[in-house]
Amino acid sequence: MANGNFTQVTEFILTGVSERPDLQIPLFFVFLVIYGLTVTGNLSIITLTSMDSHLQTPMYFFLRHLAIINLGNSTVIAPKMLVNFLVKKHTTSYYECATQLGAFLVFIVAEVLMLAVMAYDRYVAICNPLLYMAVVSRWVCLLLVSLTYLYSFSTAVVASSSVFSVTYCSCNIINHFYCDIAPLLALSCSDTSFPETFVFISAATNLVVSIIIVLVSYFNIVLSILKIRSSEGRKKAFSTCASHMMAVSVFYGTMIFMYVQPQANHSMDTDKVASVFYTLVIPMLNPMIYSLRNKDVKAALKRFLTNSCCSFKPM
């Protein structure tokens, strides 16, 4: 780039999900409902797995942290997006944008890792049931969750720092509904090879390692289930994994489509659809996926509602 006068960017303008004025109010109500369901569903999972004595197992411990991650991911994105549907100028400050990107990366990387941890948990539970509570002890659960958050935070700091270490000058219109890496780097007027390379390698490594853990875990799970002689036993074993397999397929499929591709192949409109899916739709669906087919969660919800009703009865 030739040397010359330029204006350092101090704020960005988000184009949003759609630039059509007639769609702003309808989209506001659509995403308000989605976010409301996300908050309600994930808070319900967090509350039930924290308070109900029947849900104090490693599986529900990890499920609680997945719900925390999903709630955090949506909350980083949705409130700002909803406000922008109602105002004319969709601005965000330089540091607000950097903070949103960093927080988003913390939760999205943590979700990738947490799904792998949950797959390992199911592998131990089905393939080594007698050793389950010894292998996946309380200490091991805390260690796995702590490492997940620590790694995701470290990755987010390095990635967001590298993205905002490049120079942004003059053009400040982000073709997205939140501050994401690809549309931000597209605005840079300096060399972006380092952040592009780091993000590509990091995203690819995280996904590949996580997917390998999931595939190896479920390969061994399937082999163990096929060895079960009774059809009822096989059905019960499959039912404990069906929800997680569904959540993993939807999330990893979207992430592979979104990030493991060169910068030149990105289509921003397609990325917006994918981003809506994994930042808002998947966090809304996960509580439904994990609760509708889960007898323990449904029973815990029934007990919680019964106890709540009893506590409000007049003396």
Image (cartoon, rainbow, N blue to C red):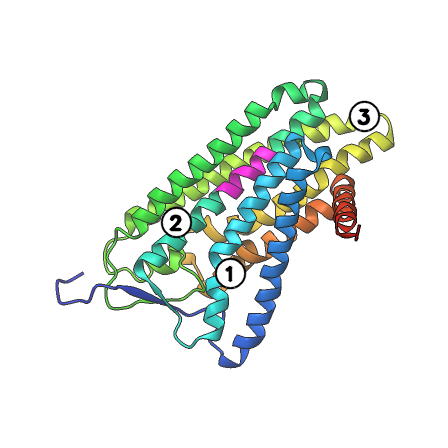
Q: Is residue 293 visible?
A: no
Earlier-in-chain disc, 1 versus 2: 1
In the picture of the structure, the residue carrying the numbered disc 3 is 228
Q: Height in image: 295 above or below 250? A: above
Residue 122 horizontal/vertical position (percent)? 66, 31
Is 188 placed left or right of 52 in the picture? left
Is 145 placed left or right of 7 in the picture? right
Nearest-to-viewer mark from 3 and 2: 2
Q: Distance from label 3 to label 2 (Cα)?
A: 46 Å
Element marked by disc 2: helix
Amino acid type, residue under disc 2 in the picture: Gly
Is 43 placed left or right of 84 in the picture? right
In the picture of the structure, the residue carrying the numbered disc 1 is 78
In the picture of the structure, the residue carrying the numbered disc 2 is 102
Residue at 67 percent across and 39 percent down: it is 51
Residue 217 horizontal/vertical position (percent)? 63, 30
